Image (cartoon, rainbow, N blue to C red):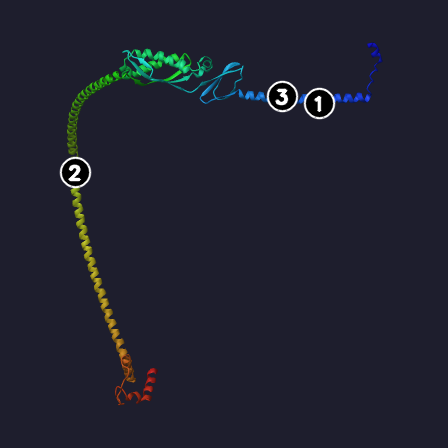
Amino acid sequence: MNETNTLQDPLPAKPSLREQLADLGQGLQAALQSRTLRRSALALAAVAALYGGTSWLLRQVQTVPRGSVLVRSGIGQPEVIKDGRAWVLPGLHEARLLPARDLMIRRSGSLAVQTVEGLSVGLEVSLRVQLDPQRYAQLAKDLPEHFEKELIEPALTAVLLPQVAQHTVRELFSSKRVEIQQLVLLQLRQRLGADGLILKDLQFGAISLPDDYRRGMDSLLSEGLAAEKMRYTLELKEKEGLQTEIEAKAAGKQREIAAEAAAREQLIAAKAQEEAMKHVLPFKQRQIEQRQLEAEAERQARVKLAEGAAQARQIEAEGEAKARQKLADAEAYRVAELGKVNAIQMEREGQLITKHPLLVQKTLADKLSDKVRVIVAPPGIAGSLMGGPLEAQPQKAKAEDTEASAE
């Protein structure tokens, strides 16, 4: 039955060439699209991986703070980085920050220590510690995380308690405080040095004493201070007495030396005066002779000056007499000449008045013109002062004027 049906089914038809080419083109296009998508996906994955890797690497950079050092180990020798930044990759590197500055560590005074008397006293201790720079790599591996409490404080307690237990409170408080401090410093420095720590300084601070012991200590200190004060006072008085005695001896010695020096000075002065007198007496004699010569010279100079002054006065008197004589002759000549001139002038004036008698009236009128306004003259009389002659002979006066002007 089945075989019959199979024989009866028709055979499928073969696709044509065009259909085969179309199917081939669609297959190629799908393959190209799938390849482009795969490339884009690969590029995005690569970018995402690169970004993630960069971010992860940046998170692995560790900055070294100021005052610290970073010790990195893992690949090769350990490396000490003092400043800047460094890569610390998980699984490859191990890193630890260590302090590079000095560390100040303080032990509280509430922690008691026992003295040789069995008293518990509180003692503050301050330490200044630094990590050994030459051993940073070893310290990064071996040093505890809290090394202040786990390493330094136990070492300090182990060194401090035995030292304090060998001394009394008085020694710890005052007399041997510096000595105990130096012993603890040396022993603790040696102990910490083995662990890579350098102890630079150690100082004791305040000491807390029990109240009863403090009161007794204060009274003992007061008595001790009083005894010390009395001892120092007695020593001071003794030294003052010795100083006074020494000063008295020194003053006596100085007076003796001063007296001897004064005597020697007087002796030297006397000898010097004697030697000086040998030179002074001839000098005084020469001074006296010089003064006599100077007096004689001065007297001669005064005589010469007096004679010169007398001669000068005589010459001046003679010159003055001659000058007066010449002045008198000149005055006489001047008076004679003036007389001659006056005589000639008067002669001329007389002749002029004789020729012109009206000049008298005119001169009088000129003199009185500023005081007299009106002149009242009597009737004309011949030969009178006013009147007649003014009009009598006009022709005659005119002729005389002409002759006078001709002369």
Res. 202 visible in picture? no
What is the quadrant of residue 248 in the picture?
top left
- Please state which of the two labelled residues, at mark 1 or mark 3, is closer to the viewer: 1
Q: Marks 3 and 2, Cα distance to the nearest angstrom?
A: 134 Å
Question: What amino acid is labelled 2 in the image?
Answer: Pro
- Residue extending farthest front: 1
What is the x, y in percent for residue 359?
29, 82
Q: Residue, x 64% and y 22% (percent of image)?
A: 43
Which comes sooner in the sequence, label 1 or label 2? 1
| Kind of element beneath mark 1 | helix
Name which of mark 3 and mark 2 comes first in the sequence. 3
How far apart in space, not on screen, are marks 1 and 2 (Cα)? 152 Å
Residue displayed at 30% across by 87% down: 390
Image location of residue 13, percent across then percent down: 83, 18
Q: Which residue is mark 3?
A: 46
For numbered disc 2, what is the local secondary structure?
helix
Quick one: SS at disc 3? helix
Q: Is residue 305 above or below residue 157?
A: below
Name the quarter where the N terminus is drawn. Answer: top right
The residue at which mark 1 appears reads as: 33
Task: Give the CA distance from mark 1 to mark 3.
Answer: 20 Å
Residue 182 vertical placement versus 350 (above, below): above
Few, some or many C-alpha atoms within 10 Å of disc 1 (few <14, some 14-19, many ≥20)? Answer: few
- Residue at 28% in and 88% down: 387
Q: Mark 1 is on which residue type?
A: Gln
Identify the disc placed on residue 282. Answer: 2
Q: Residues within 10 Å of mark 3 (few under 14, many from 20)?
A: few
Q: Quadrant of the C terminus?
A: bottom left
- Label ID, residue 404: none
Rendered image quadrant of residue 257: top left
Query: Is residue 91 left or right of 116 when viewed as pictured?
Result: right
| Residue that appears at 19% across and 53% down | 305
